[in-house]
Image (cartoon, rainbow, N blue to C red):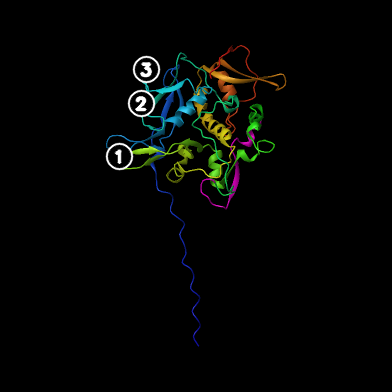
Amino acid sequence: MAAAPPPSLQPQRQPPPPPPSVDLAIRDDIEFCHPGYAAPTNILLSLPRVDLGSAAEATVFGVHHRTALVACQIIAGNAFETGRLTTDREGRQQVGVPLDGILIGAKYYFIIDGVNQYPIVPSFQDWEFPHGRIPDFWPELPIPVNPTSRCAITNVSFAVKRAHLVPREEGLWYNRNGMTKYGSGLGDIDNAANILPLRRDLHKCFDDRWFAVVPETPEVATTARVTTHSAAQYLTHILSKDAAELWPEYHHTIVQSLHGGSRPYLFARFAWAVLLKVKPFVTAGWPRHVIRVHISNGQSEVEYRADHLNGPQLQDLYGGGESKAATPRKRKFDPGSRIVTFGIK
């Protein structure tokens, strides 16, 4: 009697191919420059070209105007009312792109009228949260009807971690800036409003500052010739070329599962991601006018002042390799530096 044939086996599956090659990694960044310093060491911020723009008979990429503008305003000490972008160093040529449009130029200048060498914030620890002054287009969030622990970006239920919007390692900043007032329950850094469920790989990318969550107003084509805009929604926004493989699928993805009280924490998270990008400008070896936090009386008194520091001082204070914390080194401040009271609102 012939032996029975062995049971058929499921065909083996090959691992999926790598994501298609995208050109995000080779596109030139858009530069946002400080008018008070000479080129080429005046680049305040660089952002990758992640948003599809428009040009005559060509496909071009750029960056959302309002997102870039708010990033620069944060860097300039929350200059929401006075800061604007221009295409020239003198501030005469206003950017003609609508705030919800796409900037496609190679270089822009961030201008504060009447102040040429305005101070900038060199690190997240030196940034003062703008209580009562978050820009209005960052919308309030509704209380979710059915709260979920699924990933807020992929909607999967497996391998999900609780991501902190204001990172746990920034607990000192959190308490110093009174962020407990926005939280649920006890309002500490672990409160539900400061938490976003994310799949583990996206959680790591989020903590590596590859992307942030920002409001944008999506365009909705109603007819072939008429385009309207819907209400602003919180979307993912890629901030780093390191995220080139994430960009095709996870840029401009609607973020779900946001807690009704998360708005101030989302804004702080955006600042946390953006302010690390200022480090090359701060540590380039040149004198800079910077806004620094000054603590006295055993942490009980906090003051934000503008200081003129030279290159070695800035390198000593902010030149450490801690890419994640982005906090100033704890070194004694040189009393010989010139200290100027300067407030930008």
Query: Magenta region: which residues?
Result: 152-171
Name which residue type carries label 1: Arg
Name which residue type carries label 3: Arg
Residue sitting farthest toward the left: 57
The residue wearing badge 1 is: 225
Q: Is residue 163 magenta?
A: yes
Name which residue type carries label 2: Gly
Return the x and y of residue 154 as percentages of the image width and height: 51, 48
Mark 1 touches mark 3? (CB < 8 Å) = no
Query: Crowdedness of circle 2 by 10 Å Cα count: few (<14), some, many (20+)?
Result: few
Q: Quick one: label 1 or label 3, which is nearer the N terminus?
A: 3
- Residue at the spot 41% in from the left edge and 37% down from the top edge: 50
- Which of the 4 quarters of the picture holds residue 23? top left
Mark 2 touches mark 1? (CB < 8 Å) = no
Foreground: disc 2 or disc 1? 1
Say which element carries label 1.
loop
Q: CA distance from mark 2 to mark 3?
A: 12 Å
Query: Crowdedness of circle 3 by 10 Å Cα count: few (<14), some, many (20+)?
Result: few
Return the x and y of residue 181 as percentages of the image width and height: 65, 31
Specify whether residue 55 is in view. yes
Residue 6 versus residue 122: which sits nearer the camera? 122
Query: Crowdedness of circle 1 by 10 Å Cα count: few (<14), some, many (20+)?
Result: few
- Residue at the spot 49% in from the left edge and 79% down from the top edge: 5
Mark 2 touches mark 3? (CB < 8 Å) = no
Return the x and y of residue 279 as percentages of the image width and height: 52, 27
The residue wearing badge 3 is: 92
Foreground: disc 2 or disc 3? 2
Q: Which disc number belongs to residue 96?
A: 2
Q: Is residue 291 magenta?
A: no
